Image (tube, grey):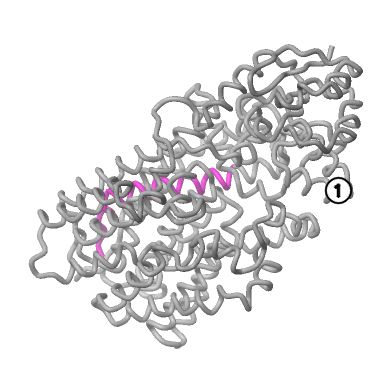
Amino acid sequence: MEGRIGLKPASRKALLPLEERCVLYLIVLMASWFVVATGCTALGLSFKTLCWVFSFALPVCFILIKRFSLDRTDAHESPDPTPVAVRIMLFLLCMLGASLGFLEHFNIPDDGYYFSGRTVYYLANPDASLDLNHHNHALLAWPVRYPLVLLQSISLLWAYIALLTGSTGLGVVHFVAPTIGGFFLPIVCYLALKRFVKNPLAAIVGAAAILAFLSLDGITRRSYGFFLFVRLRHGKVFLMSVLIPLFIAYSRDWFSRPSWRHATMLVLVSLAGAASSDSTLFMMPMLAVFLATGCLFSEGISKAVLKKLVGYFTSMIFLYIIGVYLLATMDRSAMDYIGFETFGEGTDFAAHFRFVFAQWPHPFFALYLLATGVTWLGLDKKSDRRFLLGWSVAAVVILNPLLFGFITTNLTTSNAYWRLFYLLPFRVTIGLAPAVLLARATWFRTPIAIGAMIAFLSLAFVGHQIDFLHKIVVFQRVPMSISGYKIRETVRSDVELMITRAMPGAMVAPRLYSAVVPLYTHEFPQVSVRGYLLSHSAIAHGQPKLADSRLLAIDYLSGEEAGVQDLKLLLANEGLKNVVASSSCANRPQFQRLMKKHAFTRVLKETRFSLFVRG
């Protein structure tokens, strides 16, 4: 049933604009992948079976896309086609975003955590049963089970694409994934702005302003610009960059005209979020609370509004069910361990605030507030101004030091709270501020819009020449390259060399290499890929001292003085086949005696490391 729920207004069908259809392809395919992958995992089917089932399900996906590509509008409404100039400008923005995603060359150790345990493993072992384990660890008496990977099926999607194209999983992850994310980022920003500003030219200038700002805001590694562009290959960043703005757009559609179609779009984008990241479990419901408050401020409290909000939150019911399942199956003490105390970065509200906004005063924080104020004053509709006010008020009421402990204990974990700052209206209002100003200008024409867009983008790319900006501009701090994986060059060359000489089997290596080796191949499972994941698993199995000991051994191999006794315990395990030591460690006589005692032979001696194999 289309139209308002319970009503049958006169209506006609029209094809959705091209940009809306592009996004529809994305979320239908991602949502379908999540459903099929979850079902295959629950049944214990193999990755190969998942690929076959999804391939056969694709025709159904395309039928859904065709069905929802028809937008039903009231008969008295006139169509609002997107001008050709806007389409061209949007395409250019998308190509720019895709190019930035493809070319950015920032090394992130988290890649080993997100991809090697599933993308690389299942691509190499397609007949293996799907489960909730990380398959990149070795020498443990238990599997590294991590139920949250249920909400990271995008890692399997990259393996599926690699299987279809005959490429490597690492190639898909480092080039295809960020290119897709960069392409869609301007589209979803444009669509979110269009729900507030009807003038498409103004909305496209606003999208260009957002893209430009994300190129400038690189003051911290978790600031809006640095995080949302540079880490697009990670599911949680795809969620924040692409799916969150889309969720805002679809929420506005629901609030303005509740219908089965709009409810379905909310379900689809929520499922796409569930495919991307476990952060969806708390980010989308929390954002829904903020936006629902905006709806209450805008429309007041009435039976009709409350009914609308019930339907709104019901669209995410599967997220609540998954959340309950994960709380019931995950060890609470292990979950509590995963916090920034591991990295010495602090665990209070102020520390999380600094992760995103750095030390006060933040260079751009005044701009965020100014943009929000300009947007609020410039919006044409009083209801839109109230909506933005309600969104902002809800965010301030919930995201503060008083509720920090409650939220981190019951809704997030102590290392994930900072992500909620991405739900503030700041990113939207950075684009809305110039959009509403231009939309209100009677002299506004296409040439001026094109000039404004070029001006915004020019500022982004010459920002490194401006004294107070050059130290924080994102692409001043991130190398741009067209060749090579997104791994530090010295580490890449070291790893590519060592895997040619290592013996298939378990490996222990300094942290510099342990997260990278499994990205290339599954043949060398690591004693530890990421320290806190090993500790999380050990705590869940009542063996925290084992994890502590192994991490100390890795520290010793990295060049630290402490940890030799822990290394001795590790070397006694006959399953260990490869030892990688930093040059400073490999030159120690004590270490060399240990290698000889346990029948390890040095097969590589390089400037930064030495490789020893058993036998």
Main SS class of the magenta portion in the image: helix
Q: Is residue 67 visible?
A: no
Per the image, is 19 magenta? yes
In front here: 331 or 476? 476
Q: Position of residue 419 (x, y in %)?
A: 55, 60
Q: Is 217 positioned to the left or the right of 286 in the image?
A: left
Per the image, is 156 magenta? no
Q: Residues within 10 Å of mark 1 (few under 14, many from 20)?
A: some
Vertical order, 5 against 301 (above or below): above
In the displayed orientation, state which residue is furthest to the left.
Answer: 443
In front here: 265 or 75? 265
Quadrant in which the C terminus appears: top right
Vertical order, 194 against 108 (above or below): below
In front here: 48 or 293? 293
* Range of magenta residues: 11-36
Q: Amino acid at mark 1?
A: Pro
Q: Secondary structure at mark 1?
A: helix
Q: Which residue is mark 1?
A: 544
Vertical order, 360 against 339 (above or below): below
Q: Residue at x 49, y 67 (%)?
A: 360
Q: Is residue 285 visible?
A: yes
Q: Position of residue 481 (x, y in %)?
A: 40, 30
Q: Is 390 positioned to the left or the right of 585 in the image?
A: left
Q: Is 229 positioned to the left or the right of 538 in the image?
A: left
Quadrant in which the N terminus appears: bottom left
Q: Residue at x 62, y 23 (%)?
A: 495
Q: Position of residue 14 (x, y in %)?
A: 25, 56
